[in-house]
Image (cartoon, coloured by chain):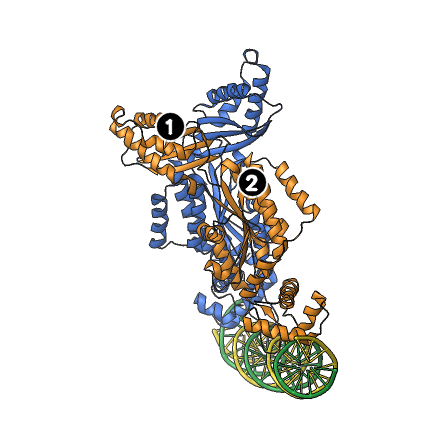
Chain colours: A blue, B orange, C green, D yellow
DNA sequence: ACTTATCACTCTCGGGTCGCGAGTGCTAAT
DNA sequence: ATTAGCACTCGCGACCCGAGAGTGATAAGT
């Protein structure tokens, strides 16, 4: 599609624009790329890139600005950046030092990530499915509503509100608790669900059985519901998007968990870059760099940062990867 | 300090400014207050109010704008607003419908509050001290770090990371867990702490005792650490403060839990209004309306909203009170 | 066919000017 | 103490204009 020089021109243009935020002139491309051609040649190339839809002029006779397609081409061809040693060691010492319960660790990870990247950061908690259960309790809340609390071997806590088909007595609830605790004991939840289904129906009182089964069913969704979303570093927003309308839109996205999930939650097992249109987000100039983390048997989650398309992708991608890897390791042992 | 008419003039001026955001002219005051005097009289009063520091002119020969002192006088003298029936029933049905675990309920309460008030909302979780403990577990994390998990009678979960003075064996940890579970069983935490101190030192192995005591000490701070802070409705920011620098500052405050606590956490048992300077916040035009909620034995917390000083106080105060009361009731049974 | 030097042309940006009008403070009368 | 009348002030928006950066086109060179 593009020969080497035009690729280099596009690359230089994107990087110059990322650095300055100003429309990029042919001379600026020349300066940055250090190519041994004249500015007129660059101008010809730029006209070509424009006809392909990679760049555009904000107005006649101005410099060029990358289009979303231009950014897409750039990120697909950019080589990964390098981390400064200081950054790397900051990440490592963070995960060596911090000992907190999961929710606080994830919240603080957003702080680290946004500190390093200078972009707002999002972390999605790992699922619960693979964890083995260390303790289980049923707590009555209202009449037919109980809370199921599980503590995993790694100390994570899952709380689930379950609606009962009937209003159980305290005794029935205790019996169900005992049954469930046995079924769950030192088992991954996924395995325990089968065990609950297989309980001998003839040896157990009808009411107790239905309570137990109701809780068992609810546990199927425990994975999704424990995938909490954490956001940090939103103060960066005002500097990144100089426009109030944009800040407003982005804050609207950050406000609701489900839209955050939509931004981050592709299934990809590698670090990805997604641009506004690709996420069904319109009217705002948005890029999301996100990567998975793998906490082994404790599940997987995702970390990411949001920024304008004019974003330092090479550096950001490395930071997201490094933080994700370290977070996974820190959780995974 | 002020006679009746001047008080009325100030009140009309503040309300007009809250409604329009424009400097208020003497005629505008007249129109809003419906007083039977001429605009010249109002002008004289305004000059007097200005000499007292309640209002100021953005520039010579412009209308008047309230100063922080002016707002202070206004909120101290404003009669509380009325809630529309729709608003009240929205609050009530919210707390009747929602059944979630605590953290999600609090998070969703910020959504409700900011929806109704049109301001960003903050909720501080209730403490844990008064709760009685239903279940207790110690989970080893790293060598000398363990996680203490408590489930309260009302189904709340507290997780605390505790550093040990030594690296306990599994057996020692189990023994400590048993001791602590006994001490805590169906007791409020505050009472249990004394019991732990009073354990018979001669009947228990030295290591187990020191582990137990370390956990006991950590439980003292359980109350503070479970007072999570939740924020919602930040999208409103962009509309309320039309200035990017202000939005940036406010986001900086919302980003960090401790600054949020500082904004909300006065000890007052009634709804209060605090203005920027009174909270050691400078360079930004900020007002915080916050009120307590009382969940009975399950502790107390605080709900509030942030806005510019140009804020609909009468309406907002009522909403904060109503949401706080309903939240307290919903948790308190 | 591609590259380069040159140059006329275009369009934004920032600064300066200016008139309008809202709103005040002052004064004198009631 | 209140009011009518009036001269004065000052921000705001509209308008204009020149400078300068950067382009596209053209024509010559490789």
Q: How far across and how far down the image is residue B259, in percent? A: 45, 53
User: Residue B165 versus residue A74: which sits nearer the camera?
Assistant: B165
In-image side of B307 versus A86 (left or right): right
A2 over A60 or under it: above or below:
above
A29 over A113 or under it: above or below:
below
Q: Earlier in the sequence, mark 1 or mark 2?
A: 1
A281 over B94 or under it: above or below:
below
Q: Residue furthest top?
A: A202
In-image side of B102 versus C19 (left or right): left
Task: Determine whether the residue tagged by mark 2 lies in a helix, strand or loop.
Answer: helix
Task: Determine whether the residue tagged by mark 1 lies in a helix, strand or loop.
Answer: helix
> What chain does mark 2 sit on?
B
Q: Residues within 10 Å of mark 2 (few under 14, many from 20)?
A: many
Residue A280 — which label? Answer: none
Can you tell which quarter of the image residue B145 is in? top left
Image quadrant occupied by the N terminus of chain B: bottom right
Per the image, the residue denoted by label 2 is B328
User: Residue A313 versus residue C1: which sits nearer the camera?
Assistant: A313
CA gap, disc 1 and disc 2 = 29 Å
Q: Residue at x 68, y 76 (%)?
A: B40
Residue B183 — which label? Answer: 1
């Amino acid at each position: 599609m593009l020969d080497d020089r035009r690729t280099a021109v596009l690359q230089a243009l994107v990087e110059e624009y990322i650095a300055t935020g100003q429309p990029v002139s042919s001379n600026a491309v020349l300066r940055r790329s250090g190519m041994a051609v004249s500015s007129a040649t660059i101008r010809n190339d730029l006209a070509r890139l424009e006809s392909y839809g990679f760049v555009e002029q904000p107005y006649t006779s101005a410099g060029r600005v990358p289009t979303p397609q231009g950014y897409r081409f750039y990120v697909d061809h950019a080589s990964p950046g390098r981390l400064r040693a200081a950054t790397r060691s900051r990440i490592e010492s963070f995960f060596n030092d911090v000992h907190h319960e999961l929710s606080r660790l994830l919240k603080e990870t957003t702080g680290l990530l946004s500190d390093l990247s200078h972009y707002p950061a999002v972390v999605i908690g790992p699922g619960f499915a693979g964890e083995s259960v260390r303790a289980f309790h049923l707590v009555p809340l209202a009449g037919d509503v109980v809370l199921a609390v599980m503590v995993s071997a790694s100390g994570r806590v899952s709380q689930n509100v379950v609606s009962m088909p009937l209003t159980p007595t305290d005794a029935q609830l205790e019996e169900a608790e005992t049954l469930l605790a046995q079924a769950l004991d030192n088992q991954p939840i996924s395995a325990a669900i089968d065990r609950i289904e297989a309980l001998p129906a003839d040896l157990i009182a009808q009411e107790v059985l239905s309570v137990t089964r109701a809780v068992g069913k609810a546990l199927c969704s425990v994975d999704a519901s424990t995938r909490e979303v954490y956001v940090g570093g939103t103060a960066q927003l005002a500097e990144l998007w100089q426009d109030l309308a944009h800040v407003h839109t982005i804050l609207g996205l950050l406000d609701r968990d489900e839209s955050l999930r939509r931004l981050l939650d592709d299934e990809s097992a590698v670090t990805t870059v997604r641009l506004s249109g690709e996420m069904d987000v319109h009217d705002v100039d948005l890029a999301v760099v996100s990567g998975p983390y793998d906490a082994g048997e404790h599940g997987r989650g995702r970390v990411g940062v949001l920024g304008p398309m004019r974003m330092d992708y090479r550096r950001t991608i490395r930071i997201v990867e490094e933080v994700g890897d370290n977070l996974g390791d820190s959780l995974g042992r």
